[in-house]
Image (spheres, rainbow, N blue to C red):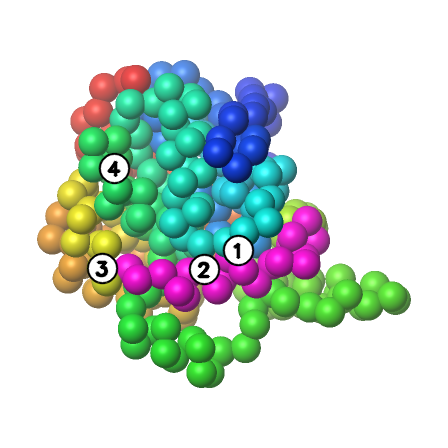
Amino acid sequence: MTVPHQAIRKGYADSRFGQLHYVETGTGGPPVLMLHQTPRSSDEYRDVLPLVGAHTRAIAMDTVGFGASVRPDEPMSIERFADGVEDLVSGLGLTELVLVGHHTGGVISVEVAARRPDLVRGLVLSGTPYVDAARREQVSTSRPPIDLVTVAEDGSHLLELWQRRGAFYPAGHAAVLNRVVLDALRVIDRVEEGHQAVNHYRMEDRIGEVACPVLVACGELDSFSLPDVPRFLKRLPQATSTVLPDTGVPSVDHHPAAFAAAVNDFVGRLGIEGA
């Protein structure tokens, strides 16, 4: 799907780490801040932004260490990613918002919502894993690296990256895969740290602090996170859920219209005035 991009504005905000890159569109309605998965950037929401921005002020950021945002020397962590989100929000002068997080971005969103119930008025957790002791143990003992490849002089690592991510997309999405590989190449020396940050996070200690309404969304083909939807609903009594048909892990850029429709419906039901 291709949508007009001319209304998307780019910007940088200062943070305790250095400058953070973000893009935005729209001016009316409540601010909606979108956080990407590993190893993506705000580009993951390229086709979603105009659709959400037609109703809200839609913002997508490059989280600390990814995209065009600063890459600190310190190891990546969910807490450090959340620090960056708070700094961006402060720099933009936002006093309330809806957070949308996809995979890694969803885990970051849980941490931000737990810290800042005064700020986060609603939360969309898309394809978000429920990270507890059982998952940490399973991942540490049985799962190989996801995006880590060895840089080869003949460039064969580019094909390896393409094939790993391409397995999640049907035919006809070469343009999107170009964007995925480009994002991964930007952080290729540290690409696995985002996944490691997720699996070190103690979500079970924080999720009880989330007080806002929550939409738990997941692609029906997302075998990584779909089994965790009931667990979120159990821990978050104020949560509802939706399953996005005919898509999986890459639901944001695979079916942006369906993804944006789910976000817009949720934001509309919150009844937040424009900010």
Mark identifier at residue 197? 2
Residue type for callout 3:
Asp
Mark identifier at residue 75? 1
| Quadrant where the C terminus is found in the figure | top left
Residue at x 23% of width, y 19% of height: 273
Q: Nearer the viewer, residue 34 or 251?
A: 34
Asked which secondary structure carries label 3, the reply is helix
Residue at x 82% of width, y 68% of height: 152
Q: Residue 87: x percent and y percent?
A: 42, 31
Residue type for callout 2:
Ala
Residue sitting at the far bottom: 142
Give yes or no for contact between labels 1 and 3 (Cβ–Cβ under 8 Å). no
Observer-side mark, 4 or 1, equals 1
Q: Which residue is mark 3?
A: 205
Q: Which residues are magenta?
A: 184-203
Observer-side mark, 1 or 2, equals 1
Give yes or no for contact between labels 1 and 2 (Cβ–Cβ under 8 Å). yes
Residue type for callout 1:
Pro
Asked which secondary structure carries label 4, the reply is loop
- Residue 52 showing in the rendered view: no
Q: Which residue is mark 4?
A: 116
Left or right: 20 as drawn, with respect to 220: right
User: Counting other residues with Cα less than 10 Å from the Cα at mark 3, is it few (<14), some (14-19), or many (20 or more)?
Assistant: few
